[in-house]
Amino acid sequence: MTVIFCGDEGDLYIAARDLPELFRLLAAEDEDEPAHGAHVAWLERTFGLTPAEDPDAVYQAALVEYGRAFADWWLTFDDEDSIIADLLDELEDLNL
């Protein structure tokens, strides 16, 4: 179940390939939060996972795997690429 982020200011990107991957990303991003230790413990206890060591690599893997298919699907509903311009630029940079 791919996780797509749709922001209220027009952001649109593939955040993770699945929910456990998203949980790992969230654990990597909130290290300064008071509940970080509790989140990491929950992640380990519930899923046997640890925080993502390289969040950019996780994002890139999701983009490579699902980016082109998602962009093509999105364009079937919206023939203007303005909302996914950044995603299309990233895919072009990766030759996808």
Image: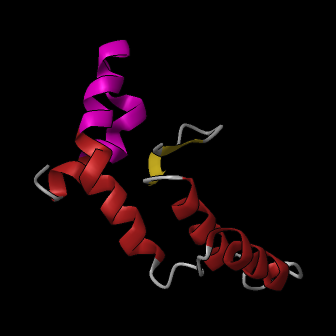
**Residue 85: quarter of image:** top left
Task: Look at the image and give the residue range highlighted in magenta.
Answer: 69-88
Rendered view: 57 above or below 9: below
| Residue 2 relative to residue 50: left or right | left
- Residue 71 point in image, percent of width and height: 30, 34
Residue lying furthest right: 34
User: Looking at this view, is 18 or 85 the one in front?
Assistant: 18
Magenta run includes residue 16 = no
Residue 26 showing in the rendered view: yes
**Residue 64: quarter of image:** bottom left
User: Looking at this view, is 95 or 64 the one in front?
Assistant: 64
Majority secondary structure in the magenta region: helix
- Residue 45 point in image, percent of width and height: 73, 76
- Residue 26 point in image, percent of width and height: 65, 68
| Residue 81 relative to residue 30: left or right | left
Magenta run includes residue 78 = yes
Residue at 57 percent across and 69 percent down: it is: 25
- Residue 77 point in image, percent of width and height: 37, 14
